[in-house]
Image: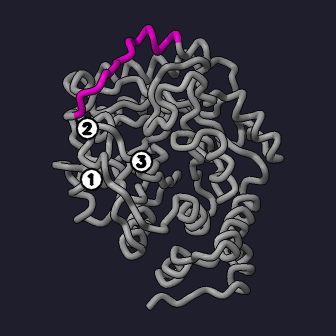
Amino acid sequence: MIQKMAIEELDRLGEEIIGGLRLSDDNLRALLSLESEEEVQKLYDAARKVRDHHFGNRVFLNCFIYFSTYCKNRCAFCYYNCKNDIERYRLTREEIRETCKVLKGAGFHMIDLTMGEDPYYYDDPDRFVELVRTVKEELGLPIMISPGVMDNATLLKAREKGANFFALYQETYDRDLYEKLRVGQSFEGRVSARRFAKEQGYCIEDGLLTGIGNDIESTVKSLRGMEANNPDMVRVMTFLPQEGTPLEGYQEKSKLSELKIIAVLRLMFPKCLIPASLDLEGIDGMVHRLNAGANIVTSILPPDSQLEGVANYDRGLEERDRDIKSVIKRLEIMGMEPAPQADFERVLGC
């Protein structure tokens, strides 16, 4: 039976985390099981207090460039899995260079180069390394790479050419659920790739998927699994059924909301980057995620971009509202602002 957390305990929680409290598994269960509006709001209040203690009202901004939507994998939850009959694209190096020119001086802290596990790049990984070099030369900004499970030699070359962050989401540390989600992919292979990247000086990002068969015990297991990686960025994303995928018709009844898990992540990882993604609900959703304790806005697209995001709630809409100017305008309304680049460099340890 899960032991409830009293309102008075929730009121003290933020200060206790700042003072060095580490949450026990029972604490995590209690927080994840909160249901009343008052309780959940207290959780968000605690998370914001912790975030503001470490970061103030300053937010980081991450530009998302999904440069190839080809993929060799069969992930059951992903729109871009190789079995889905969809239109795909692969940007050329020159197209990426032109995109970079549009981004110069826009105010981004980092550029996220994301692809599916595209055979074009896996057959000749130096093509990927050259893209990293090109973006670094054009913009001089920190670069996050999200290329899937690249081999160690390629990760080393990309690091030498300017990559700073390596994003590789496990989605879940519940092995039974993992096998249903990341069909035919090695659990240990993803863990090992992150570990190697961390050892080579990368900052690393791990991520969970919620709303897809994960109960409280499964989520606690996943939170502890992430913790064991010593990550620099931790994220959670709500599963959104994607047309043409095996889970297209899946409906989740869980009360484990993304916002609740974001707040718990902030309490577990006080100094980490935690994304407020635009992928599911756009800028309105960004506000909710920041209010739950997030501190980096992700999936901001280049101006007038037709590039894909991860989940794309806005696929087909004429006004996508995912540009940096719109984000900054809403941050100002919230009393928040983009951090100086020097703050981000300190986070990276550069």
The crowding category of the residue bearing disc 1, from other C-alpha atoms within 10 Å (few below 14, some 14 to 19, many at least 20), is many
Residue 105: assigned label: none
In percent of width and height, residue 56 lies at 78, 53
The amino acid type, in three-letter code, at marker 2 is: Asp
Q: Is residue 40 above or below residue 322?
A: below
Q: Is 337 placed left or right of 10 in the picture?
A: right
- Of mark 3 and mark 2, the one earlier in the sequence is 2
In front: 297, or 271? 297
The amino acid type, in three-letter code, at marker 3 is: Leu
Q: Residue at x 69, y 56 (%)?
A: 291
Q: Secondary structure at mark 1?
A: helix
For the residues marked 1 and 3, what is the alpha-carbon distance in whole angstroms? Answer: 13 Å
Please provide the residue range marked out in magenta.
84-98
The crowding category of the residue bearing disc 2, from other C-alpha atoms within 10 Å (few below 14, some 14 to 19, many at least 20), is few
Q: How is the image coloured?
A: one colour
Q: Quadrant of residue 60?
A: top right
Q: Which residue is mark 3?
A: 240
- Of mark 1 and mark 3, the one earlier in the sequence is 1
For the residues marked 1 and 2, what is the alpha-carbon distance in whole angstroms? Answer: 22 Å
Q: Which residue is mark 1?
A: 181
What is the quadrant of the C terminus in the image?
top right
Q: Residue at x 46, y 33 (%)?
A: 309
For the residues marked 3 and 2, what is the alpha-carbon distance in whole angstroms? Answer: 30 Å
Q: Which residue is mark 2?
A: 151
Q: Is 42 placed left or right of 232 in the picture?
A: right
Q: Secondary structure at mark 3?
A: loop
What is the quadrant of the N terminus in the image?
bottom left
In front: 198, or 211? 211
Q: Is residue 301 above or below residue 8?
A: above
Q: Residue at x 62, y 41 (%)?
A: 297
